[in-house]
Amino acid sequence: MPPASAISAAAAARSLRLASRLTPKSAPLPRGFELAAVSTGVKKSAALDLALIHSTAPCTAAASFTQNLFQAAPVRVSRAVLDATQGTGIRTVAVNSGCANACTGVEGDKDAQKMVDLACEAVGAPKGAGLVLSTGVIGQRLQMEKIKAGLIKAGKGLGNGEESALKSAATAIMTTDTFPKYLSRALTLPESGVGFTLAGMCKGAGMIHPNMKVHDPTTATRPLHATMLGVLMTDAPLAAPSATSALAHALGDSFNCISVDGDTSTNDTIVLLANGLAAPNTAMSATDTVAFATHLRTFARDLAAMIVWDGEGATKFVSVRVTAPTEPAARAIASSIATSPLVKTALYGQDANWGRILCAVGYASVPDGAKLDAGAVSLTVRSNGGELKLVENGQPKYPIDETVASKILAEEEIEIVVDMGLGSKAQANYYTCDFSDEYVHINADYRS
Amino acid sequence: MPPASAISAAAAARSLRLASRLTPKSAPLPRGFELAAVSTGVKKSAALDLALIHSTAPCTAAASFTQNLFQAAPVRVSRAVLDATQGTGIRTVAVNSGCANACTGVEGDKDAQKMVDLACEAVGAPKGAGLVLSTGVIGQRLQMEKIKAGLIKAGKGLGNGEESALKSAATAIMTTDTFPKYLSRALTLPESGVGFTLAGMCKGAGMIHPNMKVHDPTTATRPLHATMLGVLMTDAPLAAPSATSALAHALGDSFNCISVDGDTSTNDTIVLLANGLAAPNTAMSATDTVAFATHLRTFARDLAAMIVWDGEGATKFVSVRVTAPTEPAARAIASSIATSPLVKTALYGQDANWGRILCAVGYASVPDGAKLDAGAVSLTVRSNGGELKLVENGQPKYPIDETVASKILAEEEIEIVVDMGLGSKAQANYYTCDFSDEYVHINADYRS
């Protein structure tokens, strides 16, 4: 049996520092969005565990869901809502923590559907105009009486645009997160000059290796699954198909390329809501739609990075940048490095054991067709502490300057750069953290 | 920085108990095999770090090598030897620990070749009749002066059939292993009635997720890579093609289905040597060849299991048994469960968090073509402490009896059984261990 779990003093101090650096003091909501956060008692502590989001105007909505075979009940139900509404007319999103309502069978599906109905009732929205997200322990049933009472309470407590509302909601969806993750930005559409707000929150610290597919309500593809949750809100006048494509564009360098432990959850969901109140009855031009998608991508990446910073037991933030002959190859190699326990423990130990990085490059499951050559690979590691080219065209650059290596690895933020050579142009990034004994402690007794 | 590495008292006691249970007191060698183990000083301690194997009669040889893109120099050199000799006439194998001679560029290749030449010289074998295996830190050059002196010393100290020689050799190839891994069995070929001995050793505790391909010297396939080493020796009169097919048969339920951390090394190698001295100038019948292959498979599985028992920081031995529509699907699902940090930390914490197992089933990279249905999956966990059917046809079996669950998980040896349903018949096993804070400690400062 492992020692009892408790966040260390060092980890607590780091969490405070990160929260202050990464999240804003004030987080204005887009026009028309109201949020509430309550404690239902589903979490054993009296902590906030239910967030309710309401838009006074109907929203276009897009969402991406985990591709896990065991899609959780809230994922299945939310997909059905998007299919039925074609991503229009959405008014509310309910998010609970403490119970994932995953692997709960047919009764779990009924619970998730009931949660949607109760959320719509609580905000006075038409039936079927709501989405539901859950996170927490897999395999346990939702305590519906507690959820019901919580939704009613939340519906009465919706705060209209309070600058602390987003922070409270982000707090309510936390599980092993040590700080709430949220952002708000005031932006402008370049062509129309319309000012709009983009605000959002996400959660996640473990079971993080999202591999989501944007759900397209116009086709019948089966989406995949993971547990990280996020809700992105804007008052920009985004049409439903544009919301879907903007979200797909954003995922590629954000929520779909982060890893804490390589475990892809049953519940991963990102929802994008746009109510258009920044410019009612306006259609966005093509230029503005592209500009919005670019803003959303940066915004999503900054939110997703918070999850890695707050990865369970993490002490390092590591960017893995790979150039390879094809994008799938680059992504497979970056993912392999980002999930290798040996690379991650070496980073924790600040040990310049760079052979482990090459080893992880070498066993990546690279999709067929990408020809690789060990003799063409270059590897560089850098941080604010310096830069070391460790391997060039497959040849190690002896001797390794261990003093510089130590300085590089002592930094909290580290970059691993791999170039597979052979004229490679395709790139992929992965954001990951190190692997510490605290990760083990957190997860050896998560349920207790 | 993590705390300093040191094996805990509990781990040390467990290691002693396992060594006494799993390895024999006396380990006779097959006729004609002589072994030596010496300390060269490549390891910083004065520990044994070089094993030399010699057969007085030429051997047929087969080998499997890692499929890592960065095949270590000893892998490349040994492959070339097998190609040149077509797996015949092999007389010696040199194995060093402390330095993997991997990712060492063209100079590393020369070092490995030199090591073969020196080994042949040391035992008085013709040039090119030797194989070389290395394990240890990646990216460091072999200290050839020390290796040379060690090989000369070992050549003079070859012990002919001493029952402790195998244990000493197995000790010399250890890295983070806590006990030497070796076996010896006296067996009989059923048709000819010839008695023969099968003896072998292996090493490995971390960077263990072998994915080897048996090298076929008659074709020009590129083998794959991992760091686990093993040498299997017999005096049975095995022809070279039979050695290759017997090894391939053995790997499927042994060295190729174990995992400690999911990291597939640059150096994984298993060598099978057969000198025929049990029945000189005899050809094995088809029946006896099949019988040998069956014995080899059991022998290899028992050796491979020792690696999992001794996995870095391990406190549990876990068998994952999956039945699925296809064998590749079963293997992918078993591998996914066996490498999930969340499953492995829950096992360490003796926490019946079975949802994590289903989650890992659900995100397995199942090869195209295998149709799966979450609603058809069944999950059982059992040990000497009892048995619990947790999920049947996709529906959780509520309520989970937590008392029984605790008894099951308190055992040291645990079995996870997954049936994907849909009339599945194909099976795959994976053997894995749990994931403890000790794993992190061992690997955060491995080089120091």
Image: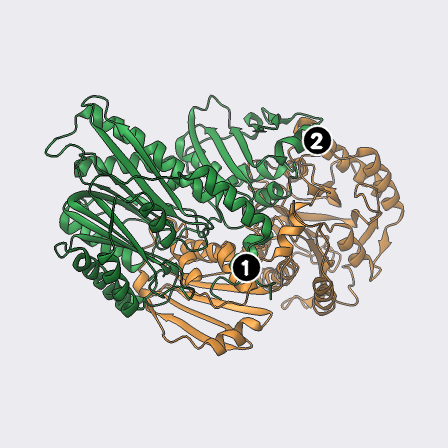
Chain colours: A orange, B green
Q: What residue is at 12 percent from the left and 55 percent from the top?
A: B126
Position in image of residue A4 (x %, y %): 71, 49
Q: Residue furthest left?
A: B281
Q: Chain of mark 1?
A: A
Report the residue marked by disc 1.
A253
Q: Please, is residue B331 above or below residue A173 in the view?
A: above
Q: Amino acid at mark 1?
A: Asp
Residue B223 position within the rendered picture, expressed as x and y whole percent measured from the top left:
28, 48
C-alpha separation, residue under disc 1 versus residue under disc 2: 42 Å
> Residue A24 appears in which quarter of the rendering?
bottom right
The answer to whether residue B4 is above or below residue B217 is below
Query: Is residue A426 left or right of A16 when viewed as pictured?
Result: left
Question: x%, y% of residue B355?
Answer: 63, 37
Disc on res. B402: 2
Q: Is residue B40 left or right of residue B288?
A: right
Whether residue A436 appears in this view of the structure is yes
* Residue type for callout 2: Glu
Position above or below: A416 against B6: below
Q: Position of residue B252 (x, y in %)?
A: 36, 36
| Neighbourhood count class around disc 1 (C-alpha, 10 Å): few under 14, some 14–19, many 20 upward | many
Element assignment for label 2: helix
Q: Residue at x 55, y 64 (%)?
A: A349
